[in-house]
Amino acid sequence: MSALDHKDTAEKTGLDVLQAWDGAAIILLDLDAFFASVEQLDHPEWRGKPVIVGGDSERRGVVSTCSYEARTYGVRSAMPSVQARRLCPDAIWTPGNFPRYIALSKRVMDFMLEESPFLQQVSIDEAFMDISPGRFVKDHPILIANRIREKVATLGITCSIGLGTSKSIAKVASDMDKPNGLTVVYPGREAAFLAPLPVRTMSGVGRQAAKRLHAYGIETLGQMAAAEPNILKEIYGKNAEMMRNRCLGLDASPIETETEVKSVSNEMTFSTDLLRRDEIEQAVALLAAKVGRRLRRKQLAGHTLSLKVRYPDLSIRSAQRTLSQAVDDEQVYTPVLRELIDEVWEPGCGLRLVGVAVSGFGQRPEQMSLFDELPQPASGKASATRPPNHGLVEATDLVKNRFGEDAVRFGREFRFAERDTGTIAQKKDDYKDPLHPLENH
Ligand code: TTP
Ligand code: MG
């Protein structure tokens, strides 16, 4: 049975009596041409036209994404803007509006959470969710998927959903009928669904792996599932059997609802390099405050402080310090970060970027150093070190929670507000493939 048959099944089942769903049910929702669709929503005059969200071609920018109209000209994500301009000279260009994309993304995730608590968001526009019929979820998975699609449509954008018994099936299925499609792979149909598809369709089969598979005449996932063990071993090492299982639709990787936070960080790139120590200290203090606020919001306190800088030649240096007590208050840790400046910077050097991170949330080191006089937490999660005037930070947090990020700003924040470049920097994590501890192999 081909993928299209499954699509038909999905469409028909909306009307007919639904076939019982026996087993796990996982969906992957992916918004269609996300940033570009939001731009077309917000600028009605751009609808039906090629729209490109991306960086300036004069400044060696790249395409973030583009509308489906622009895709017909061959424009793609991550393409150099110069090339995109050549392919589609009449396109409408926009640098994008990241806060707006985040707000809409959050609305979509909230719609999903109305259906099941087992959500794993993997990028700004993509999330897995476990909707296996059971204790938390009562309705048929197809009803749930359609309900989510309808709610997303009320926002003025569309999504595509893949539904199957595992994450890898849901992921492959979500791509089969874009935009605005629902592709269902019923339990027991996994291997047949995957068999005719090109190997590249599967998470974990990158360009290099595909090349090597092609050299053995392996073009489809069915052929890959039936490949000689040695071939998969040569390409995937100890992950060979896991990959074979994936090709058979036997992937068992669970939904990871709580992506464990490993560090909280913030960085700024400056339109003109920072040259003076006082400027660098101010940048560090501003970033430290932002990180502190996020730590407190997440109720995290960490032991390790990191300072990262990038020089005009784009090289990076960083320095770390581990404290005996967990910290979440910038009044406590900014002085330490200031000391770290000397480890990464010398007078006369320009800095293009400064970054601050707090990590080490779990550990409780034996050794006391910086805050020897403070009591160690007795047990459980490390509690944070608090200075006498911690109340000021808490009061500021409260006002910002209520009235927004700009409600309270210290003098130092104004000085830098106009200097960062305002580029839309997506966290690398946003693109990580949730299924692939394999890509590095
Ligand atoms: P994708 O889901 O990969 O792309 P998309 O939503 O634009 O298109 P599709 O219909 O094929 O799903 O990425 C989601 C958003 O992330 C995308 O709208 C823009 C952003 N993005 C980048 O900024 N750079 C990139 O290289 C990619 C792939 C995405
Ligand atoms: Mg998308």
Image: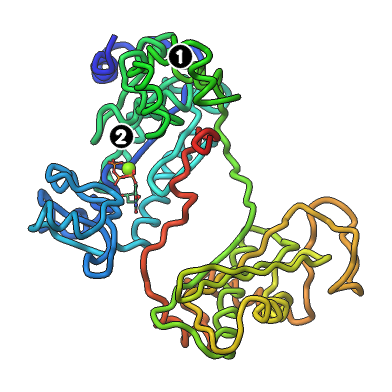
Q: Judge whether 196 appears above or below 386 on screen.
A: above
Q: Position of residue 307 (x, y in %)?
A: 63, 71
Secondary structure under tag 1 reads loop
Q: Earlier in the sequence, mark 1 or mark 2?
A: 2
Question: Which residue position holds label 1?
Answer: 248
Q: Is mark 2 within 8 Å of ligand 1?
A: yes
Question: Which residue position holds label 2?
Answer: 160
Q: Position of residue 301 (x, y in %)?
A: 72, 61
Nearer to me, 427 or 6: 427
- Can residue 133 be seen in the rendering of this structure? no
Residue 282 falls in image quadrant: bottom right
**What residue lies at 42% left-to-right and 29% top-to-bottom?**
209
User: Farthest front residue?
Assistant: 215
**What residue lies at 37% left-to-right and 34% top-to-bottom?**
207
CA separation in Å, label 1 and label 2: 23 Å
The amino acid type found where label 1 is placed reads Leu
**What residue lies at 30% left-to-right and 34% top-to-bottom?**
160
Is 117 placed left or right of 59 in the picture?
right
The amino acid type found where label 2 is placed reads Ser
